[in-house]
Amino acid sequence: MKILANDGISKTGITQLEAAGFEVLTTTVAQEQLIHYINQNNIVGLLVRSATQVRKDIIDNCPSLRLIGRGGVGMDNIDVAYAKEKGLHVINTPAASSESVAELVFAHLFGGVRFLYDANRNMPLEGDSKFKQLKKAYAGGSELRGKTLGVIGFGRIGQATAKIALGIGMKVIYTDPFIDKASITINFFDGQTVSFDFKSVTKSALLQQADFISLHVPAQKEYVIGKSEFNIMKEGIGIVNAARGGVIDEVALIDAMEEGKVSFAGLDVFESEPKPEIKILMHPKISLTPHIGAATGEAQDRIGSELASQIITLLK
Ligand SMILES: NC(=O)c1ccc[n+]([C@@H]2O[C@H](COP(=O)([O-])OP(=O)(O)OC[C@H]3O[C@@H](n4cnc5c(N)ncnc54)[C@H](O)[C@@H]3O)[C@@H](O)[C@H]2O)c1
């Protein structure tokens, strides 16, 4: 049985699938040639990340296809309900990348409070000629320890982010309309554990109390953070979005940064991805990454391995 991993799959996943007797093809087939390729090669499983679109045309015209797999969480690029209606298995790997995304959030937060995003832009240009001026410009840093992190969306990634925050001595508050209470256990390297109990606060309480905010909600119809939300935040807040483009109103974000309300933003996802607005890309107060939350070796290994296990169970 042949599996096409059109957006790639880790070696771990390939090894597991091959050991179970599957043939894994890792060619990246162009979107418009996919139907032809799947039919010609009698593909039973199509694995994608976020790039390949799996719409009705593929589902209707590829009779060999029995399974669609998404390496990662969001399934916006797959017509899930339609595929299931047509009897296809649709799988994803929701838990595999949570820790990696959470660590990226902290890369933005640690970088944000010490202006690393800007220092890294200016040191290569002026580090030798204006060292003292740059030293002064980046002198007003602050610590994360002791500050309050507000987590919007307390699912897998929100909770993984909270664990890191707790580990470095931050206070954590969260808002989530579907999770009233949560208990988080942090596991240390030597087997010790510490547990914390949380209760959801209202969104407006979170916006007023947080020193830093990190968003971990699924794609929404409306902005979660727009002008009115920025208005009630503390002065000088730092905000990170590693969830989905479109949960923060980017125009309102730029205004809030220009008014001094927001001291920095960390963005891994963008409203107009994959062509982020130039105003966002050039802004001196934004720390930028190109949607790499799940892009670690560890997360990709877990994704490959979780996909392989599910495929073996479903198709063997
Ligand atoms: N940056 C990346 O590379 C990357 C990688 C993986 C996932 N993600 C994104 O991270 C986000 C979170 O993923 P997850 O695995 O934690 O999902 P999850 O489903 O475990 O958690 C999402 C939580 O958000 C809550 N929620 C929904 N609407 C809300 C709202 N308006 N306000 C507050 N809470 C709300 C839900 O109740 C849920 O508990 C998703 O958007 C996902 O696509 C990004």
Image: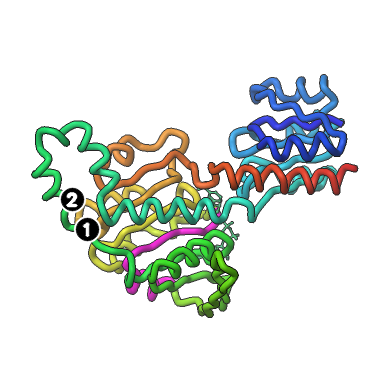
Density class for disc 1 (Cα within 10 Å; few <14, some 14-19, many ≥20) is few
Residue 109 horizontal/vertical position (percent): 36, 56
Q: Which residue is mark 1?
A: 141
Mark sitting on residue 138: 2
Q: Is 182 on the left or on the right of 206, as rendered?
A: right
Amino acid beneath label 2: Tyr
Q: Give the spatial CA distance, label 2 vs label 1.
A: 7 Å
Give the residue at x 58% y 61%: 156
Q: Secondary structure at mark 2?
A: loop
> Residue drawn at (44%, 56%), measured in percent from left and top?
223
Residue visible at 29% across and 44% down? Answer: 117
Q: Quadrant of the C terminus?
A: top right
| Magenta region, residue range | 203-218
The location of residue 90, given as percent across then percent down, is 76, 46
Cβ atoms at labels 2 and 1 below 8 Å apart? yes
- Quadrant hosting residue 77: top right
Q: Is residue 183 magenta?
A: no
Residue 201 screen position, x and y as percent: 46, 77
The quadrant where ligand 1 appears is bottom right
Which amino acid, mark 1? Answer: Gly
Vertical position of residue 143 compared to residue 44: above or below: below
Q: Quadrant for the N terminus, please.
A: top right
